[in-house]
Amino acid sequence: MTRSPAVPAPGDGPRPAAARAAEYFELLLEDAAAIEYERPVVRARAAGADGDELAELERVKLLALEVREAFAARRRRESELSALFDTASDLAALRGVDSVLTAIVRRARQLLGTDVSYLTLNDLAAGDTYMRVTDGSVSARFQALRLPMGAGLGGLVAQTAAPYATASYFTDARFRHTDEINDGVHDEGSSRSSGYR
């Protein structure tokens, strides 16, 4: 029985490019971390692969990483759609504005994976916005905050009706800081990154 010289048996020498490329399928099936996709290239380089083979492996690696990201994006999308269907089902069964708003805020927190979520409503007579519903909040002070338009990140969102996010709430100069709002945010333990939508 003869064997093709392009496919050496185990122990015959360096692995062929096709076998190295097949490792990427295994990595995809294992849902391996992105860093693991460097392994075939590193092994090929250590085995003395030539420049053409290394370039081809790099190309295959990039394609495999794109497939990996596409799978991850599809899983995220399916999860989001499932959550939206669940939300619609939950909301259809609820009666009363408070129950509906609470369900929306809770589901938003789950979808975004945040520690706290809340819904503020504008009070046109008072010229501010206030916490109507919170989920995950542990601070009564935070839950009772009223934010003048343009004050605090939530007040900026209420004033502009545009989304904002910050990685450093207490040093962000885009909005007016007040002691009351800063104390409420600090009390909630939100010195970590805060985002408002």
Image (cartoon, rainbow, N blue to C red):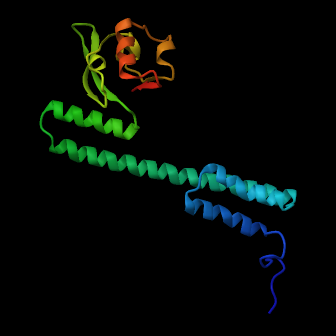
Task: Tell me how many marks there are.
Answer: 0
Give the residue drawn at x 84%, y 79%. 5
- Indicate whether 2 appears above or below 28: below
| Quadrant where the image shows the N terminus | bottom right
Residue 157 visible to an observer of this rendering: no
Give the residue drawn at x 84%, y 72%. 13
- Indicate whether 108 appears above or below 152: below
Question: Residue pushed farthest left?
Answer: 95
Left or right: where 123 falls relative to 117 = left
- Indicate whether 159 appears above or below 23: above
Where is residue 122? Give x, y as percent: 26, 16
- Indicate whether 5 appears above or below 57: below
Where is residue 42? Give x, y as percent: 77, 55
Residue 52 visible to an observer of this rendering: yes
Where is residue 154? Give x, y as percent: 37, 18
Where is residue 95? Give x, y as percent: 12, 38
| Quadrant where the image shows the C terminus | top left
- Asked where in the image residue 105 lies, by quadrant, the reply is top left
- Asked where in the image residue 30 lies, by quadrant, the reply is bottom right
Give the residue drawn at x 68%, y 66%. 22
Left or right: where 33 falls relative to 17 = left
